[in-house]
Image (tube, helix red, strand yellow):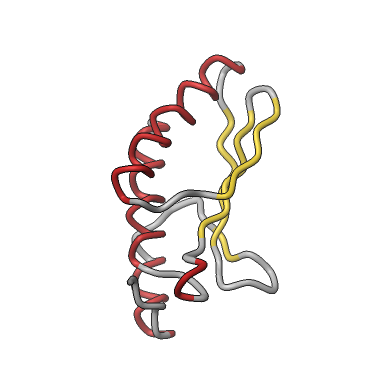
Amino acid sequence: MAQKFTPEARKAALGRLKNWSDVSGRDAITRKFIFKDFREAFAFMTKVAEVADELDHHPEWFNVYKTVEVTLSTHDAGGLTELDVKLAEAMDKLAG
C-alpha cells in the first residue's frame, strides 16, 4: 500500500508539478485541463484511463465539453502519495 507523504516529502513532490494546486480541506491536489473540443478531452481521458489502470490508481474527475477537472488523492492512505504524483505527471505529459 502507498504511504501518505510526510509534510516535507509532500512539499518536495509537489515542487515537481506545475499547474496543480491543493484542494481546500483535503489532502489532495487538483488541476483543470482545457482542450480544443469534447473529442480531444475525451481522448485525453481515455489515455489517462489506461495509465490509471496500469498504476491501479484512479482519479476523481469531472468532464463538461472541453474541460476535464481532476482531483488526486490516495484514499487507502488517507492523502497524497507518490501514486498521485506519478498519475499527475502522466496526465501532464498526455495533455501536451
Say above or below: 46 vs 29: above
Residue 13 x %, y %? 35, 68
Q: Which quadrant of the structure image shows residue 86?
A: bottom left
* Image position, residue 72 (x, y; %): 51, 57
44 sits left or right of 12 in the view? right
**Nearer the observer, 12 or 83:** 83
Vertical comparison of 96 with 53: above or below: above
| For residue 81, side relative to residue 63 (left or right) | left
User: Image check: 29 left or right of 93?
Assistant: right
Residue beneath the point at 39% across and 42% down = 92
Q: How many marks?
A: 0
Q: Residue at x 33, y 72 (%)?
A: 1
Choose top left, top right, bottom left or bottom right for residue 41: top right
Considering every residue shown, the one lying at the far left of the view is 54
| Location of residue 53 with respect to 11 vertically, above or below | above
Residue 80 x/y as whole percent: 46, 70
Q: Could you tell me which quadrant the C terminus lies in?
A: top left
Identify the residue at image location x=40%, y=57%.
Answer: 17
